[in-house]
Image (spheres, grey):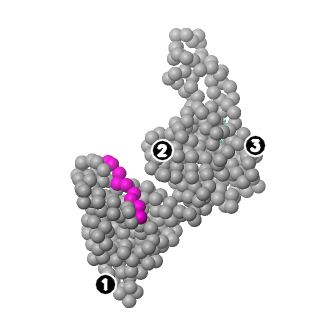
Amino acid sequence: MFVVVGVTGGIAAYKTVQLVRLLVKDGHDVHVIPTDDALRFVGQPTWEAISRNPVTTSVHDDVAQVRHVALGQRADLVVVAPATANTIAKMAAGLAGDLLGTTLLATTAPVLIAPAMHTEMWLHPATQANVDTLTTRGVRMIGPETGELTGGDSGPGRMAEPERIHDAVLRELHHGSGGAAGSAWLVTAGGTREPLDPVRFIGNRSSGRQGVEVALAAARRGADVTLLAANVDRSVLDRAAGDPRIRIVPVSTTEDLERAVESRSGAADVVVMAAAVADYRPHEVADEKLRKEHAEGPLRLELVETPDILAGLARRRREGQTIVGFAAETPVDGESLTERAVAKRRRKGADLLAANEVGWTAGFEQDDNHLLVVDDSDEVVADVEGTKRDTAEVLVDAILARSR
Ligand code: CTP
């Protein structure tokens, strides 16, 4: 897609470099239009190197190609990040004094802006009135977020993080045409916890990052996602919390998760069981805290098996529904990850199974992952190493390729 990124004169311009990088990585044709002020923060060579396209800043460049309107006419989407108070005022007034101004007037594509300014400027009635004007015209706002601002003060005015702007851009680009538009997804993330007593539990190290990234990747393709989050840290869940396509339902124990899956899976076109589910739970849960003085010798816990939610889903799967399992595997001598993934997929009856190798240092709580996806013909349909966001994208591609 042809994406125009307008950059205006705020310190947050340095973060827009990351936004451009993400868009280029997606394969979009990205054209950056920095204002003169923006170039005081990040220079033209940086924009050219990162966008891999020439950058012009003046309406008088390439006049023969009518560049002052050509970029706007060709754009599938225009995003302005950061958008300063001055730029927002100029946009509201329809001023066309520079290349970004003419582009914004010439385009009929969706326009997204990520405001960035000091709190007082953001809250000023003039800025708020301009924002209202732009919103009424269909311009979409991303942020601003509340947080620390340059200069040490804090409040609303901070530019949304580049990953969040990127999510919003992709959602807009795929809107109505994304591979998952109109479909309902149920994604589980995190790890279940089985209580021993009111203060202790048996749990696992799953952070929920991979599952949250799967939910985000599906939402970017236009899916309506219910995310069943089992003990996922606020900091991880925040990535999905602002996404209007994702509904978050917190759960804790395997029983909670099973109940939530049962009541919601019927309506889902795709179910992704990324959560690490406890295989056993204590036979009895003590009403009061277990005390050492009551134990004689080693403490013995009796554990009973929990129901296999994934296998149950696969058995009851309805026509057209895609069931996807996960497997976190520690290395086994003489057996490859593929062999173990194939065996587990068969045992569970899932349509696809995504396996990754874990250990004391690999897999859990990490940003990077190695994911291998096998299908019901025992074929490896994806084998990818990268961030959990990258691996989620590839998994969602594999799911969409199958459910088409
Ligand atoms: N799973 C589930 N219900 C359980 C246990 C696991 O739905 N009680 C799901 C997980 O969400 C995951 C897949 O099954 O999608 C594989 O989980 P894993 O713990 O690797 O499977 P197990 O059957 O427990 O296999 P193992 O004996 O290797 O632990």
Residue 179: give x, y in percent of width and height.
60, 62
User: Residue tagged by mark 3?
Assistant: 315
Q: Quadrant of residue 189?
A: top right
Examine the rendered structure and indicate whether residue 310 appears above or below residue 45: above
- Marks 2 and 3, Cα distance to the nearest angstrom? 30 Å
Please state, as top left, top right, bottom left or bottom right, where the C terminus lies in the image. Answer: bottom right
Q: What residue type is labelled 2?
A: Leu
Please tell me the numbered disc located at residue 60.
1
In terms of secondary structure, where does tag 3 sit? Answer: helix
Q: Which of 176 and 295 is in front in this view?
A: 176
Q: Is residue 206 in view?
A: no
Please report the bounds of the magenta region as a residue range.
Answer: 138-148
- Marks 1 and 2, Cα distance to the nearest angstrom? 47 Å
Examine the rendered structure and indicate whether residue 162 appears above or below residue 262: below
Q: Is mark 2 within 8 Å of ligand 1?
A: no
Q: What residue type is labelled 3?
A: Arg
Residue 322: give x, y in percent of width and height.
69, 51
Which residue shows up at 60% across the image and 57% down it?
A: 182
* Mark 2 or 3, nearer chain start: 2
Q: Which of 71 and 23 is in front in this view?
A: 71
Which residue shows up at 46% across the image and 62% down it?
A: 169
User: Residue tagged by mark 2?
Assistant: 237
In terms of secondary structure, where does tag 1 sit? Answer: loop
Q: What residue type is labelled 1?
A: His
Residue 165: give x, y in percent of width and height.
42, 59
